[in-house]
Amino acid sequence: MSSLLRNALVLLIASFLAMPTLCDEGGGNNGGGGVWILPCCANICGVSTEAGLAPRAMMLSANTATNVTMCTVSQMGAASATFVDDLSGVPVSLPVSGRVVTVSKLLLQALEASSKKAATIIVTDALQCGYVMRVLIQPCGSVKITVL
C-alpha cells in the first residue's frame, strides 16, 4: 500500500510539473520548431527605441536566409504587426495568422542590403497591448531581435 501511495504522489507531482503555464518568459525555439515564443505582452504607451532600455527577450538567427516566425501570448487579442526600417521610415505590414507573426526573409535581406541595418517591429492588439521590438542585422550577417 505504501508503494502505491508513493507512486501516485510521484505521478501527481510529475503531471503538475508538465502542465503548461499561462505566460512564460519566452524562449528561443527558433532552432527546434522554428517559432520564437514571445514573452508576456505589455501596454504600449509610446514607441521608444532608446538604447538604455533593457531588453525583455532576445532572439538570434544565424542569417537572413529564413523567415523569422514569432508566436504571441494567448492574452493578446487579434494582433496586427508593422515593420518600420530606420532608413526610410516606411511602415510595412507583416502577415499575422492567429497568434503567429512572420517576418519574411525577403524583408530581412532588404534590410541587410540597406545602409542602416536596423528596424522596429510593433505588434499590437485593439487594446494597445503588445510588443515593441528592435531588429538589427549584425556585421556577421546574423539577425538579432530584441523585445523592449
Image (spheres, rainbow, N blue to C red):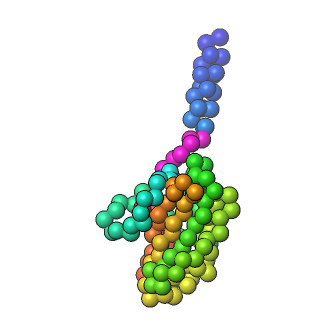
Q: Please name whichever residue, 59 or 124, is drawn nearer the observer in this view of the structure.
A: 124
Quarter of the figure with residue 66: bottom right
From the top left corner, tell me how far across and down residue 63 is, in percent: 54, 76
**Where residue 97 appears, x then y in whole percent?**
68, 62
Chief secondary structure of the magenta portion: loop
Residue 2: which quarter of the image? top right
Residue 80 inside the magenta-drawn segment: no
User: Is 114 situated above or below 52?
Assistant: below
Nearer-the-camera pick, 37 or 79 = 79
Identify whether 55 is placed above or below 40. below
Residue 23 among magenta residues: yes
Residue 146 lies in quadrant: bottom left
Q: Residue at x 51, y 88 (%)?
A: 113
Looking at this view, is 12 or 10 the one in front? 12
Q: Which residues are magenta?
A: 20-26
Total of numbered circles in the picture? 0
